[in-house]
């Protein structure tokens, strides 16, 4: 990785002086006079330029010997999930960061060297090649990057929650409390128990729950995001409200490193401070880093609007705050996508609710209306076809549902954001009843692919102002129009569905 230029340092220093949340997570600044590194939104007195060192990643700052600021808390900064590049080695490094960011990777194997080797094997390269590419592009080793991820996750749990330190250590992927304490002291020069803030400054936990803060870069249209989910919410599973305040709650079944955790989550938006306050029930607390990651995915909190808007602003002038709604569980989203083939949003919601009532396990939550878990892949793989038929699910979709569930159980398809999208798309489209539209929709919302294009989507073609949206020529015209929105076509889809496309910007080749 090349060193930042003096011009880039001056540009970043100006951003640091502005305290503008749009730059949050875009870089970190190490202050040589204090040995501390901060987010660009830190409210402490701005240091002099000559005392600043700028880093792209928190791991780079920690490698250089800086410790995270206790005030601005670098662990809260949104990540950079989307890199635009055609460089194969840089793409490999990005794929590796997605895997190393995943708390499931931290917990799957106890030996850290084995973790890195497992990531390399999953990416189809040698351990040595992965390390070389990773250091070349990111300036840190995979192990250093992984260690920073785990320690920052632990720092958030120590600061925001009242979890015992031993539980924090295990949730952050450390095999023992002794190893956790040693790593924490070595990196941060403070014992984990000393990291605890005064309880009066932390989020007050409700009985049996823990609460954490999740940050994002503005602009983010929380109202539109919540309305999207509200229109599609499943009775018994979830509830999204846009008034009197934007809030949500849903049930969760989460398997991490072979252990299944069950419970519920709830949250509310603090738009003025660019925070989402998340409440997590006791059954999920030992998997809290995974819950946090999935909620960030659900609401697309790690998107960077600047490069997206630079491409889409011309054709979607009022869509800058729109994000791509994700999902909490990839299998759940895929099932809902299959049920939504060639039917309205309301009809898809009705079918999915029937499936939940038939095969979803009951669960007790503080809200009596939120009382079901989404069915497991095993339950749907074994579902009786006659029962599926009585629910109104036609034969073709029955076959698609069962094939999808069987593929997930067999490990043939990975529906997590850290999966390799082209490979997953290929496997999905090899399953009966899953065509390009369904696969691309899954890629957009479950795999978090920023350049998905749900081919043949009638509502999309219509939103682009093309006549006869079911006509093949109109669909091809939409695809040609969308070429200039690459690599952000997923965001263009959401903006088009929201009615923000301005037809006066249509090009002559459509």
Image: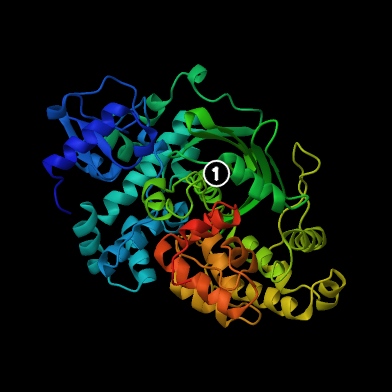
Could you tell me which quadrant the N terminus lies in? bottom left
Residue at 50 percent of width and 23 percent of height: 202
Secondary structure found at label 1: helix
Residue 477 visible in this rendered orientation of the protein: yes
Q: Please tell me whether residue 396 is drawn above or below residue 67 in the rendered image.
A: below
332 or 147, which is in the foreground?
332
Query: How far across and how far down the image is residue 260, in percent?
Result: 61, 55
Q: Find residue 451 and report its image quarter.
A: bottom left
- The residue carrying pointer 1 sits among few (fewer than 14), some (14 to 19) or many (20 or more) residues within 10 Å by Cα, namely some
Colour pattern: rainbow
Residue 412 visible in this rendered orientation of the protein: no
Residue at 51 percent of width and 44 percent of height: 292
Query: How far across and how far down the image is residue 210, in percent?
Result: 58, 33
Q: Please tell me whether residue 414 is drawn above or below residue 500 in the rendered image.
A: below
Query: How far across and how far down the image is residue 402, in percent?
Result: 70, 76
Q: Please tell me whether residue 480 is drawn above or below residue 180 in the rendered image.
A: below
331 sits left or right of 40 in the view: right
Query: How far across and how far down the image is residue 323, in percent?
Result: 51, 49
174 or 245, which is in the foreground?
245
Q: Find residue 436 and report its image quarter.
A: bottom right
- Circle 1 residue: 286
233 or 469, which is in the foreground?
469
């Amino acid at each position: 990785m090349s060193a930042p230029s003096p011009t880039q340092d001056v540009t970043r220093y100006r951003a640091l002086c502005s305290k503008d949340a749009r730059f949050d997570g875009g870089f970190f600044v190490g202050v040589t006079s204090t040995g501390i590194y901060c987010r660009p939104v830190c409210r402490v007195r701005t240091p002099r330029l000559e005392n600043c060192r700028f880093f792209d990643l928190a791991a780079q700052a920690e490698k250089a010997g800086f410790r995270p600021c206790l005030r601005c808390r670098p662990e809260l900064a949104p990540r950079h999930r989307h890199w635009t590049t055609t460089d194969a080695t840089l793409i490999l490094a990005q794929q590796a960061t997605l895997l190393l960011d995943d708390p499931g990777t931290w917990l799957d194997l106890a030996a850290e060297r084995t973790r890195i080797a497992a990531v390399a094997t999953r990416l189809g390269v040698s351990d040595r090649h992965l390390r070389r590419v990773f250091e070349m592009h990111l300036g840190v080793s995979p192990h250093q990057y992984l260690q920073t991820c785990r320690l920052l996750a632990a720092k958030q749990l120590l600061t925001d929650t009242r979890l015992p330190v031993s539980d924090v250590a295990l949730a952050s992927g450390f095999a023992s409390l002794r190893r956790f304490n040693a790593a924490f002291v070595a990196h941060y020069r403070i014992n984990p128990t000393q990291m605890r803030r005064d309880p009066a400054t932390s989020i007050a936990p409700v009985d049996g729950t823990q609460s954490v803060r999740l940050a994002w870069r503005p602009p983010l249209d929380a109202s539109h995001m919540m309305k999207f989910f509200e229109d599609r919410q499943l009775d018994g599973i979830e509830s999204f409200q846009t008034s009197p305040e934007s809030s949500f709650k849903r049930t969760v079944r989460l398997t991490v490193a072979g252990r299944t955790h069950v419970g519920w989550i709830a949250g509310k938006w603090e738009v003025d401070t660019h925070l989402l306050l998340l409440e997590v029930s006791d059954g999920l607390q030992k998997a809290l880093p995974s819950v946090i990651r999935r909620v960030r995915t659900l609401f697309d909190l790690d998107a960077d609007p600047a490069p997206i808007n630079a491409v889409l602003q011309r054709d979607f002038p009022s869509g800058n705050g729109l994000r791509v709604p994700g999902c909490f569980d990839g299998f759940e989203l895929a099932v809902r996508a299959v049920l939504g083939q060639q039917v309205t949003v309301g009809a898809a919601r009705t079918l999915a609710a029937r499936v939940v009532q038939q095969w979803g396990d009951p669960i007790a939550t503080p809200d009596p209306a939120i009382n079901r878990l989404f069915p497991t892949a095993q339950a749907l793989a074994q579902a009786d076809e006659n029962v599926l038929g009585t629910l109104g699910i036609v034969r073709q979709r029955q076959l698609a549902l069962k094939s999808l569930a069987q593929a997930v159980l067999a490990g043939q398809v990975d529906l997590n954001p850290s999966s390799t999208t082209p490979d997953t798309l290929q496997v999905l489209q090899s399953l009966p009843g899953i065509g390009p539209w369904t696969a691309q929709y899954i890629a957009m919302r479950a795999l978090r692919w920023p350049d998905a294009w749900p081919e043949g989507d009638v509502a999309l073609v219509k939103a682009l102002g093309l006549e006869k949206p079911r006509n093949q020529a109109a669909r091809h015209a939409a695809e040609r129009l969308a070429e200039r929105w690459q690599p952000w076509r997923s965001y263009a889809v959401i903006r088009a569905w929201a009615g923000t496309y301005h037809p006066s910007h249509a090009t002559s080749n459509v």
